[in-house]
Image (cartoon, rainbow, N blue to C red):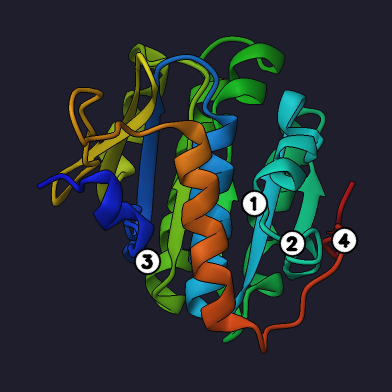
Amino acid sequence: MAYSIAETASLTIPELPSLGAGITLLEAEGDPRVPLQTLLVDHLLLEHGRGVWVGTGRYCTTDTLVSVAPDRRVLDRVEVARGFTAYQHTALIRNLAAHVDEDTAVIAVPDIDARYRDDVQGNDGQAMLVRALAQLARVAREHEIPVLCTRSRADEFTQPVDAAAASTLAVEETPMGPRFVGENFETLVYELEGDWVQTTLAFWQEVLQARQPIHETATLSEEVFARGTV
């Protein structure tokens, strides 16, 4: 199904894929930061909860999170922890359960394999990755919340991520913008001919802006750091 230009003018709640409990692996062509952070913000706006962001490497900064949020104050609901080494990262994951409560709506763990791949010799890195995945899966199961992950690349080292993921979302670049594809979801692609329009990055920003008025009672601000951040 697609919408005409006239119909999109009255479209108040455009669709993004919903996140179910368990580990969701987001596979992206190119840089996954914008789609990852768009899904995080969207889930927070819909669920009235807070998020936990376990960053590493290029994900230790949240500049793009600021750019997609419809209001900068939404970041007050995101606790950010930073693991600069494999051992810092695994400590954050191990202690994650202590920071998750009934208000936690989503956890994001971008580039989950990066530090274990680069900092640890031999098979120990993959063993640490497997333990981290098991701990994340347990938190997701016990609290019935989604854990949204990305990985630096798909290869033998990250096969445990495939095995641990309850679902997978792929985001691919079209000539006009991103398109999400999952088991039960596919982004509507809008034709450029006649009275039809195609998905663009600006469209996804409009998605989040459309979500926000529904939840105007939520408290929003700038970035705060998770307890236990290193």
Which residue is labeled 2 in the image? 71
Distance CA(mark 3)–CA(mark 2): 17 Å
In screen coordinates, is 70 left or right of 23?
A: right
In screen coordinates, is 18 left or right of 226?
A: left
Residue 147 against residue 44 in the figure, above or below: above
Residue 214 against residue 150 in the figure, above or below: below
Q: Earlier in the sequence, mark 3 or mark 4?
A: 3
Which residue is labeled 1 in the image? 93
Residues at circles 3 and 4 in contact by the CB criterion of under 8 Å: no
Amino acid type of the residue that numbered disc 3 sits on in the rendered structure: Ile
Residue 139 lies, in percent from the top left, at 49, 66
Distance CA(mark 2)–CA(mark 4): 9 Å
Distance CA(mark 3)–CA(mark 4): 25 Å
Residue at image point 64% right, 51% down:
93
Q: Earlier in the sequence, mark 3 or mark 1?
A: 3
- In the figure, residue 137 lies in which quadrant? bottom left
Residue at image point 40% right, 16% down:
29
**Which numbered mark, 2 or 4, is in the foreground of this view?**
2
Which residue is labeled 4 in the image? 222
Residues at circles 3 and 2 in contact by the CB criterion of under 8 Å: no
**Which numbered mark, 3 or 4, is in the foreground of this view?**
3
Mark identifier at residue 13 = 3
Distance CA(mark 1)–CA(mark 2): 28 Å
